[in-house]
Amino acid sequence: MLGLIVGIYTFIVNLIKLGLFAIIACFFSCVPFAFAAGIFTEIPGLSASAQSSLVAHYDGRTGVSTSNATSSVDSWTPVDGNGNSLPSMVVSSTARGTGAASLITYDGVGNLSFDDTATGSQGRYLLGALTNDQSTSFTVMWRGHYKADAPFQTSGTYAYNIGINDISHQRDDGGGGFRVELYNGTTYAGDDITAYDGTDTIWSTVITANSHNVYANGTNLNVGGNPSNSVGANADIIMGAYSGSGYDFVGDMSQMIIFNSALSDADRILVGGYLTSIPEPSVTLLLGLGILPLLMRRRRSR
């Protein structure tokens, strides 16, 4: 009888363990989707004009497809303001020359890393097309960072290029440090951005027909120049490179939100606050681990 009781007890313990393992596996396989929500819900104060001009939200917590058995990124599909997928604006991994697929990787919980450290033109980027109206006003906000001492740093490294060459975000050298440069038109050096290297930052670019303002964590970088801006309809978008040669982005990116308008300061601050509040991937993992003791206690109480 004792042996039977022990056998039943062992069977139940093993069953619970298997259940917990299944829950853990499910949690970690679903993390990129579990914390994603539409910005219309997440940013309730966003103005009607901003909502109506939203083009796409590339949210690293969802929509990232990777190659089987590797973390190499195949594509990234954005969502709309309600969190619904927008497959028509997917950006797909594209090689320049013999650039390996492994040059763009995904950590599984929200962050894409671009790591073309070669000094030639054998790179890789994400390529697609937006569904947008032609406009002289545009806003692009992204979360991520440029790595310090990245190759091509003296020639510029591009986080994105839309248009192509209608609006971009480039880290280039100048004044003994590094600056943000924009196209189209002429850009004069703004404030040094070296302090932001290697640190996730909320980057914001707001353009009109004859103005451009760039912000890092809400601070105006005072980029001067004589811009002449116009973004064509259904514009191509490249993430991680210039349109045709070197200048590859070396760094991380987890979020990009694109508007077909020049956001007001109030809306820009709201979106920046939302991007700031999204947990780091490591924090997301810790949240998942924190759930496990609760699950175990719940099992034991039954």
Image (cartoon, grey):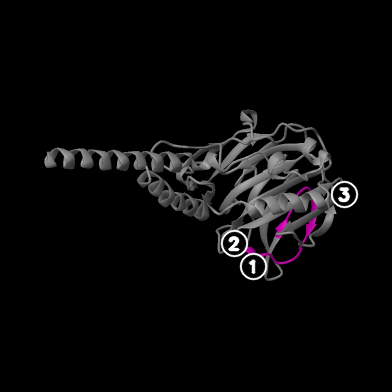
Q: Is residue 169 above or below residue 20?
A: below
Contact flag, marks 2 and 1 (Cβ < 8 Å): yes
Which of 211/24 is in front? 24
Horizontal side, residue 196 vs residue 227: left or right: left
Badge number at residue 210: 3
Give the x, y percent position of residue 57.
66, 40
| Circle nearer the viewer, 3 or 2 | 2
Residue at the farthest front position: 1
Q: Is residue 89 above or below residue 263?
A: above
> Could you tell me which quadrant the C terminus lies in?
top left
Tell me the kind of residue under disc 2: Thr
Q: Mark 2 falls on what kind of element? A: loop
Q: Mark 3 falls on what kind of element? A: loop
How much space separates mark 1 and mark 3, taking CA atoms?
29 Å
The stretch of residues the image draws in magenta is 180-197
**Badge 2 is on which residue?**
199
Instruction: For label 1, count other residues whose C-alpha is less than 10 Å away and answer few (under 14), some (14-19) or many (20+).
Output: few
Residue 228 inside the magenta-drawn segment: no
**Residue in the picture at 17% in, 40% down:** 5
Instruction: For label 3, count other residues whose C-alpha is less than 10 Å away and answer few (under 14), some (14-19) or many (20+).
Output: some
**Residue in the picture at 84% in, 41% down:** 136
Give the x, y percent position of residue 167.
74, 46
**Badge 1 is on which residue?**
195
